[in-house]
Image (cartoon, grey):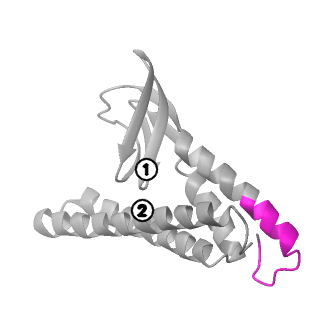
Amino acid sequence: MTNSPQLGLIRIISILEVCGGLYALWMTITAFTVWQQSGDASAAQAMVMFAQAGALSSLAGTLLWFANPKGYALSIAVQLVQVPIVSTSVFLYSVFMPLRVAILWTQQGLRFNLDAGGEFFWGIGTIQASDTYFGVNIFAVLVAGALWKARTQFRRAYPSSPEGIV
């Protein structure tokens, strides 16, 4: 794997995951400040979600950087949770860190979206959604596919990897 042409791509993916994780950890601090000043329970909930997402993404990126087999599996999982995008009056799910290239099906038709930064929204119940839409994060699908391909090549190169699941 060290001489693989995919190594550069894997390094870029690992850097993006670590940066996305650090962004989520920064948002944890922001949510903590809001919670501390207002006592708002939703800020406390956001703080916990951002912390978990940030830690998971940073861990996945770090393990991937060092070609740890668990890094491939964890990185694929980090990407897959970013694929679906749903917004209705009763359900909301939208997660991405640090980049999203999306195709959205809205009431007005097909829309393409490019977002940078991060977002972690989910909810069930009465939601103040300005628009109903369903979408797919194409960037996350492509990254998960590249990771799956690299993971398969890694498994062929190191079939008895002692690091655990790949």
Left or right of residue 153, residue 12 in this image: left
Q: Residue furthest left?
A: 37
Measured from the top left, where is residue 4 in percent x and y? Answer: 73, 67
Measured from the top left, where is residue 97 in percent x and y? Answer: 43, 55
Q: Which residue is mark 1?
A: 99
Q: Secondary structure at mark 1?
A: strand
Task: Identify the residue at image location x=33%, y=61%.
Answer: 45
Q: Is residue 110 visible?
A: yes
Work out whether residue 119 or residue 122 is closer to the camera in this orientation and state it.
119
Task: Identify the residue at image location x=68%, y=65%.
Answer: 73
**Quarter of the image holding residue 93?**
top left
Query: Answer yes or no: do the residues labelled 2 and 1 have beta carbons within 8 Å?
Result: yes
Left or right of residue 15, residue 45 in this image: left
Q: Amino acid at mark 1?
A: Leu
Which residue range is magenta in the image?
A: 150-165
Q: Is residue 94 visible?
A: no
Q: Which residue is mark 2?
A: 20
Q: Secondary structure at mark 2?
A: helix
Q: How far, Cα to Cα, is label 2 from label 1?
A: 8 Å
Measured from the top left, where is residue 123 in percent x and y? Answer: 40, 45
Q: Amino acid at mark 2?
A: Gly
Work out whether residue 127 or residue 104 is closer to the camera in this orientation and state it.
104
Task: Identify the residue at image location x=71%, y=75%.
Answer: 2
Q: Residue furthest top?
A: 108
**Quarter of the image holding residue 164?**
bottom right
Q: Which mark is residue 143?
A: none
Q: Quadrant of the N terminus?
A: bottom right
Measured from the top left, where is residue 160 in percent x and y? Answer: 88, 79
- Residue 63 falls inside the magenta stretch: no
Task: Identify the residue at image location x=57%, y=54%.
Answer: 79
